[in-house]
Amino acid sequence: QVQLVESGGGLVQAGGSLRLSCATSGIIFSLNAMRWYRQAPGKQRELVAAISRLSSGGITNYADSVKGRFTISRDNAKNTVYLQMNSLKPEDTAVYYCNTLWAAREYWGQGTQVTVSS
């Protein structure tokens, strides 16, 4: 059974930092590209950051809105992907979701709320 479990969200003031974690099970983690999405109230879910699988070099990509502030990383020994978020802005407020594809199916975590106060 594939599971993605996010943690690390919370309430932070503008300019602060948070680190989100997504622990996975039921997949061969090193073979999977991993992604972080977010969804703000009344808005569509958007891709925030992605990291390729180990054999592809762990290449990272970011949405323009978070470049230079967010960093995605992976620990293949812990089957966990992280999102380090610095210089947070009120517009970063959203539910953040971990995502991957495995055996031709798409999987999502339950989400973790990030709220940035001004």
Image (cartoon, rainbow, N blue to C red):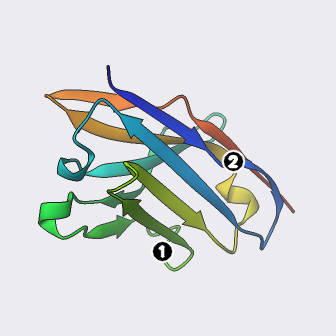
At horizontal 53% and vertical 45% (from top left) the residue drawn is 38
Which residue is at the front of the view, 34 or 68? Answer: 34
Q: Amino acid at mark 1?
A: Lys
Q: Amino acid at mark 2?
A: Gly
Circle 1 SS class: loop
Decide if residue 99 is on the left or right side of residue 15: left
Task: From the top left corner, tell me how far across and down residue 72 is, in percent.
Answer: 44, 64
Q: Estimate the spatial distance between the alpha carbons at disc 2 and disc 1, rounded to whole Å.
A: 19 Å
The quarter of the image holding the N terminus is top left
At horizontal 46% and vertical 46% (from top left) the residue drawn is 37
Q: Which mark is residue 9?
A: 2
State the residue position of label 1: 67
Which residue is at the front of the view, 33 or 30? Answer: 30
At horizontal 30% and vertical 40% (from top left) the residue drawn is 100
Q: Is residue 107 above or below residue 51?
A: above
Task: From the top left corner, tell me how far across and down residue 12 is, in percent.
Answer: 82, 59
